[in-house]
Image (spheres, rainbow, N blue to C red):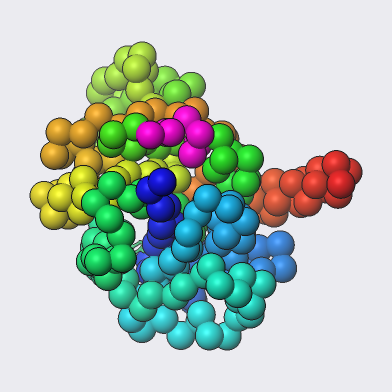
Amino acid sequence: MPKIFALVPAAGQGTRMGEAFPKQYLPLAGRPMMFHSLETLAAVDRITAVIAILSPMDRHWGAHDWSAFPDKIEALFAGGATRGASVANALAMLEGRAAPTDWVLVHDAARPCIGRELVEQFLDEVGDDPVGGLLAMPLADTLKRSEGLLRVSETIPREGLWRAQTPQMFRYDILRRGLARKPEATDESQAVESVGGMPKLVQGANANFKVTFTDDLPIAEMILARRVADEETSS
Ligand code: C5P
């Protein structure tokens, strides 16, 4: 059975939030934001290791308690200038530990509301695909292009368009080749596409949104609180 290595890129500066420190450490439901993704991934038995990719200058990791995940979580102080560089650095460090057909699952630290069930469903649906796949949502809104001046210059048909989420999971070998070919890729799928891979689309969830602006924090809090309440009811 191929192993699954989960990478959580968390080396961004989070400047869009206008905060003094990176958004992955902003308090969310009593924990730093990235705790929630790490906890969910660590709870999935099929995942061998969960690796947080941190900035080499990170000053926050050590200030928090990660002891809830004794053997599974690793901190790698090897983030790069872009998200792609952060993931590529982690892949280089996995050389020799990951076989070419092992899986690398990448999940944003900034998507804290992913639930364990959705991760399990994603893993089931990607199954033994030769390439891998990603969570994504079919586009519900009508898309407009603007060439500037806040005026619509074009409507883009939404048929066949999806919004990519994470997790995204690919075989170690193709992801490494993809990121070498397209280091500027804004997600792993784009890197894999650049070397001819056709990633599988698996339906995601609106709750798995990327926390980007300060206004997003209370929404993420509500989703996490509802999950805890549901788990308490069902146990
Ligand atoms: O900035 P954005 O929201 O697109 O970042 C997506 C994820 O990639 C975040 O979890 C962020 O911490 C991470 N990232 C990274 N290294 C960078 C830039 C972003 O690990 N240089």
Residue 232 percent across, percent down from the top left: 86, 49
| Pick the front one: 168 or 136 | 168
Q: Between residues 18 and 131, which one lies in front from this camera angle? A: 131
Question: With 207 as the anchor, is 50 left or right in this view?
Answer: left
- Look at the picture and state if 75 lies above or below 57: above
Q: Residue at x 63, y 45 (%)?
A: 115
- Identify the residue shown where x is 25% and y is 23%: 153
Q: Is residue 204 magenta?
A: no
Name the residue at the front extreme: 1
Which residue is at the far left?
Answer: 181
Q: Picture quarter containing residue 70? A: bottom right
* Relative side of 157 to 183, left or right: right
Above or below, comparing residue 168 to residue 159 in the picture? below
Can residue 213 be seen in this snapshot?
A: no
Is residue 96 shown to the viewer in this render? yes
Q: Which residues are magenta?
A: 122-128
Residue at horizontal 70 percent and vertical 46 percent from the top: 223
* Quarter occupied by residue 97: bottom left
**Which is more toward the observer, 115 or 131?**
131
Quarter holding ligand 1: bottom left
Q: Is residue 172 above or below residue 62?
A: above
Residue 74, image x and y in percent? 46, 73
In the image, taking residue 9 as reference, residue 185 lies left or right, namely: left
Q: Residue 17: x percent and y percent?
A: 48, 62
Percent x, y of residue 173: 21, 50
Left/right placement of residue 114 relative to residue 198 reads right
Query: Foreground residue, 141 or 65?
Result: 65
Q: Residue at x 24, y 51 (%)?
A: 100
Per the picture, the main secondary structure of the magenta-coloured stretch is helix
